[in-house]
Amino acid sequence: MSVTTSSITYGTHELAFTVEVRPRRTLSISVHPDQRVHVLSPPDVPLIQIQARVTRRAAWILRQQAYFQQFRPSTPDRRYVSGETHLYLGRQYRLRLEDAATAQVKLIRGRLVVHTPRPEDADHTAQLLRQWYKQHAAEQFPAVLRQCLPLLSEYQLPPTTLHQRYMQKRWGSCSPAGRITLNTDLIRADKSSIAYVILHELCHLIEPNHSRRFYRLLAKILPDWERRKEKLEKALS
């Protein structure tokens, strides 16, 4: 597998994109929520052919980038001070820092309370919250997965394992062996959005690529997937 970068000019726009070569038969183009353009290509496809395909899809790429751009300013930079709001399972909780000898995070009467010996240290508070989110993701993600699996009971899925880690550019990934990895940040979204990501990845165990067959399957399993996707991107962008 190799990854390279390239670009094309479309009118007044210069579109940069990455090309990832994989053992596959078709070429696909995707636009990520951070507006990054990614091409998956079979081996031995000349760059000029890839550039031509990107040029033909340029109008669609620009529409997708404009769509994601509308959500980008929605969340201000986190300062980790008392009074700031943070999401957990789709709800906003106001942060309260309390000076304490032992560090811990709790939900108390609608507030996200951080007990810390270093209340003025924003980086330390951020670290405590990230660990708290990680612990709760370890509880909530498997529960949502168990609710999703019956929706695919007619298919022969391989045994599925669920993992989590913080990722900058994607909500989830899935290996052919059934290893699903979710972005820990998903714990900030509501459970319907978490279920959308899990079902998206489970569908990849049946249809590995983002082909028409994949989206037909996803629509069959989750008819409102587009609404859930838009809600997720708007809430966590």
Image: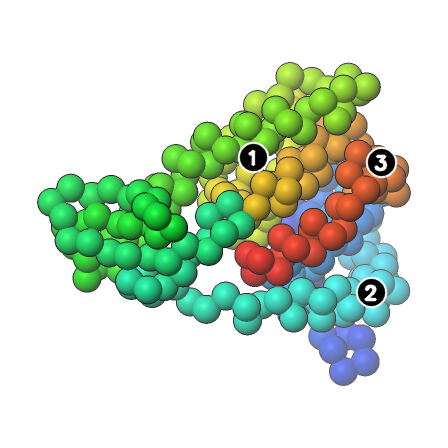
The label shown at residue 220 is 3
- The quadrant in which the C terminus is found is bottom right
The disc, 2 or 1, on the residue closer to the chain's N-terminal end is 2
Label total for image: 3
Q: Label 2 near label 3: C-beta < 8 Å?
A: no
- Which residue type does callout 2 highlight? Trp
Q: Residue at x 76, y 82 (%)?
A: 12
Residue 5 in view here: no
Out of 194 and 155, give the one closest to the viewer: 194
| Percent of width and height locating residue 107 | 35, 44
The disc, 3 or 1, on the residue closer to the chain's N-terminal end is 1
CA gap, disc 3 and disc 1: 23 Å
Report which residue position mark 1 lands on: 181
- Which residue type does callout 3 highlight? Lys
The reply, left or right, for residue 219 in relation to residue 117 is right
Callout 1: helix, strand or loop?
A: strand
- Which residue type does callout 1 highlight? Thr
CA gap, disc 3 and disc 2: 25 Å
Q: Residue at x 74, y 33 (%)?
A: 204
Residue 33 lies in what quarter of the image? bottom right
The answer to whether residue 154 is above or below residue 10 is above
